[in-house]
Image (tube, helix red, strand yellow):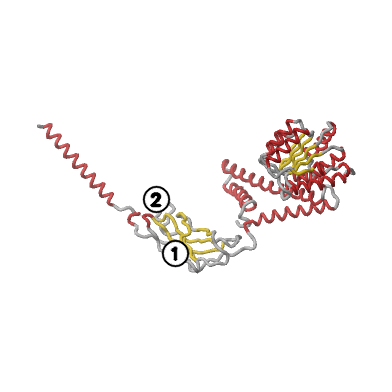
Amino acid sequence: MVQHSIIKSCCKSVVVIATLLLLITEGYSAEPSPVEKKTSIQPAKNITIKDYPGDLGTSLIIEWELSEDDQNDPKKSFVIAYEVYRKTEKTEYKFLSQVTYQKNFYRDQECEPDKKYWYQVIAIGKNNLQSIPLESLNPGIPILQWFDSRRGWIGILMLFSCSLVVYFIWIARKGKKLKIRKIAGLDAVEEAVGRATEMGSSCLFVPGILDVNDIQTIAGITILSHVAEVTAEYETDMIVPTCRSLVMTMAREAVETAYLSAGKPDAYNEDDIYYLTDEQFGYVAGIQGTMVRDKPAACFYMGAFYAESLLLAETGNSIGAIQIAGTAMPSQLPFFVAACDYTLIGEELFAASAYLSGEPDQLGSLKGQDYGKLLCAALIIIGCTFATLSSLANHYQWGTGMESSFSSIQTYVSENILGEKGFRP
């Protein structure tokens, strides 16, 4: 009996404790959270509309003061976003976009120049609460700008580079010799033609697969003129298959002029410069057939190339020809480098054209552009240097002021001079 009463007392105690805990829990759960107590939220204040500087008149900046219920801590903030609406003289307010809390601006990039726009901002809270709309009293008008101030430093760099080009062209026209780095592929032209002459074979020149409206084709024709002068002096045949009729006409004129300049106009044969087809791989197949049948001792590929680059280079390599290639197509350069003896990489093709032509305008332009690139490279190095110094100052604790100075210089070079901020701080 005693044991039974003890068990009964323990059960009653457990029930009482569980009931008390349940009442306490219900009391706490019944206590509404601050968010649940909130029935309205404060609107944003003082909306302003500004024209976005330095654009084509297609953007406006809408700014406002944050709502009093907008807190930095997401757990305490009653505002979770802001909705932006827009209207014109002929339309009512329409939803434009939504920005997150703690953000007090929005850039509207879908405007028309000299057109009036009104905006409305509504603070959005938790539990689908919305503030009363904050409307702009005065309209915003996007204005077309004559100059983009964000590109101010780029404009100065371009002006400086153009001045260098004009200066070097002026020097070249006065007869002063400009120092241009020699390119190994050009020095090998005479060697390649000489080998073809010794073997009693011909030379093959392919001016790319694009038309004369491509600058690479024009550069290739200029190099063709130089190669033609060498073949005329050595009295070696040169075959020039083309895939564009205008390229064929231009190549014939360039080769004929080269033979006249070499004093051997009778050796020129226009039938050696012929048209094959506009179809890419049909053109390549025709050239490969010529290479296999005639086995030229020297092959030149100068111009724009695509997938046919490796086909041509491998066929030339299989017949044992000296191969000199040049193109500005980055995806095709590895194939030429792997399969050819000499390769003009990228801008070397255009530099070769200027070097071989000997024209003061081309030489001066080439020299001026090189100095402009040198200036840009120097600015990049300066930015990288100060970024490194800023990191070292932070790591070794050289001082907050020194770290801030290094970081400011690096930021200004990257974002203002080489970026889009221009003269703005």
Can you say whether 200 is above or below 370 in the image?
above
According to the picture, the residue beneath numbered tag 1 turns out to be 134
Q: Callout 1 environment at 10 Å: few (<14), some (14 to 19), or many (20+)?
A: some
Q: Residue 314 falls in which quadrant of the image?
A: top right
Left-right relation of 328 to 57: right
Q: Where's the C terminus, which quadrant?
A: bottom right
The amino acid type of the residue labelled 2 equals Lys
Gap in angstroms between the C-alphas marked 2 and 1: 25 Å
Q: At which x and y percent is residue 48?
A: 50, 64
Q: Residue at x 84, y 53 (%)?
A: 173
Q: Report whether residue 360 is seen.
A: yes
According to the picture, the residue beneath numbered tag 2 turns out to be 75
Q: Residue 132 falls in which quadrant of the image?
A: bottom left
Left-right relation of 96 to 374: left
Q: At which x and y percent is residue 187?
A: 81, 38
Camera-side residue of 113 and 252:
252
Tell me how many marks there are. Answer: 2
The amino acid type of the residue labelled 1 equals Leu
Q: At which x and y percent is residue 126?
A: 38, 54
Camera-side residue of 230 and 131:
230
Camera-side residue of 262 and 256:
256
Q: Residue at x 70, y 37 (%)?
A: 285
Q: Report whether residue 178 is seen.
A: no
SS at mark 1?
strand
Which is more N-terminal, label 1 or label 2? 2
Q: Where's the N terminus, which quadrant?
A: top left
Q: Are marks 2 and 1 in contact (CB under 8 Å)?
A: no
The dot on residue 1 is: none
Can you say whether 382 is above or below 51 in the image?
above
Q: Residue at x 60, y 60 (%)?
A: 55
Q: At which x and y percent is residue 39?
A: 34, 59
